[in-house]
Image (cartoon, helix red, strand yellow):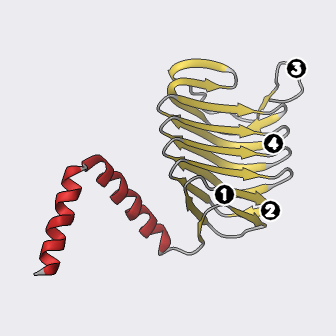
Amino acid sequence: MKIKENIKGLAKKLAEHPIKSMIGLSLAGLMTITAVKDNVHFGSTTFHNPQENHYAWGFAPTTMIKGNAKGNFYNFGLIAGENKTGDNTEINGGLSAYGLIIGGNNVGNNSDVKDMSAYGLLAGGNNVGNNSKVNDISAYGLVIGHNVLGNNSEINGNITTKGILANTLGDLNLGSNDVIGLKKYIHKTKDGEGK
């Protein structure tokens, strides 16, 4: 009898707060799925030359990648999620950052990353350092989508920016600001000094 009463009580609480319940159950499901995979981390983490896929969870986790890496890096933050690389880093894989408020990726100078994706309810943004290379870049935010390239950085792919305010390479639009099919595009900043 006690189990039946507990289940009824839980169902009643879930029905009283449907939005909180849906968010909580969704996050619990995602955490369970990634927890059964290898290389799941809770909180901020630093990697030196990692060679596999990695998943980070937390309130505002930051994943720092240094050296030569192979694999994809996923960062899920309850508030904000961020992936960062040091200077002179090469990642044969992608960076994906998700945050309920802000998701972001930052790539250091003289670095090479295959793909970058940032998602956040408030803002999603990607920053690429000077003299770096990247293929596809995507930033999605309900309010702000933001993609920035450093001086002499090369893009070989698409730049996708979505948000009420969508900023791509200093060009601000409403709703969407995409640049598709770039091949060996070298970005030059106005002053030639950097972002």
In primary-sequence order, the first of circles 2 and 3 is 2
Quarter of the figure with residue 63: bottom right
Mark 3 in CB contact with mark 1 (< 8 angstroms): no
The residue drawn where x is 82% and y is 61% is: 67
Q: Which mark is residue 132?
A: 4
Give coordinates of residue 91: x percent, y percent: 73, 57
Q: Dot 1 corresponds to which residue?
A: 93
In primary-sequence order, the first of circles 4 and 3 is 4
Alpha carbons under labels 1 and 2: distance apart? 11 Å
Alpha carbons under labels 4 and 1: distance apart? 15 Å
Q: Which mark is residue 68?
A: 2
Mark 2 in CB contact with mark 3 (< 8 angstroms): no
Q: Dot 3 corresponds to which residue?
A: 191
The residue drawn where x is 17% and y is 70% is: 7
Secondary structure beneath label 4: loop
In primary-sequence order, the first of circles 4 and 1 is 1
